[in-house]
Image: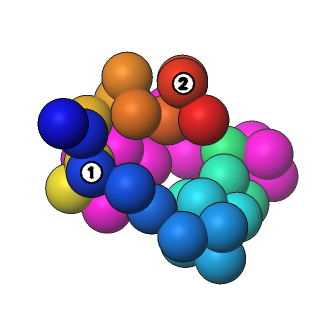
Amino acid sequence: MGKHYTIEFKLQVLQPILNGKMSIRETARFYNIPSNALIGT
């Protein structure tokens, strides 16, 4: 079963992507989470 992330963490992770500062791949690497976890959010 996959890991569950809090809403607060998800919002924190999405901020650099939405602001255009980081790509999905860069953000996933920075937060040490699989990029498919970001896409499925």
- Give the position of the N terminus as an image quadrant: top left
Q: Position of residue 29 (x, y in %)?
A: 25, 47
Q: Magenta stretch: residue 33 in it?
A: no
Q: Position of residue 19 (x, y in %)?
A: 81, 52
Single out the mark in the foreground, 1 or 2: 1
Colouring method of the image: rainbow
Name the outermost residue toward the right.
19
- Give the amino acid type for the residue marked by disc 2 in the picture: Gly
Q: Magenta stretch: residue 30 in it?
A: yes
- Whether residue 21 is visible here, answered yes or no, is no
> Which residue bears the numbered disc 1?
3
Answer with left or right where residue 27 lies relative to residue 18. left
Name the outermost residue toward the front.
1
- Give the amino acid type for the residue marked by disc 1 in the picture: Lys
Which residue does the image show at 24% across and 39% down from the upper left? Answer: 2
Q: Secondary structure at mark 1?
A: loop
Q: Position of residue 10 (x, y in %)?
A: 60, 60
Magenta-tinted stretch: 18-31
Front residue (pair 7, 35): 7
Sequence-earlier tag: 1 or 2: 1
Which residue does the image show at 43% across and 48% down from the upper left? Answer: 27
Which residue does the image show at 79% across and 45% down from the upper left? Answer: 18
Q: Position of residue 40 (x, y in %)?
A: 54, 24
> Which residue bears the numbered disc 2?
40
Q: Neighbour class for label 2 at 10 Å: few (<14), some, many (≥20)?
A: few
Which residue does the image show at 56% across and 45% down from the upper left? Answer: 22
Answer with left or right where residue 38 lies relative to residue 29. right
In terms of secondary structure, what is the magenta stretch mainly?
A: helix
**Vertically, is 10 above or below 22?**
below
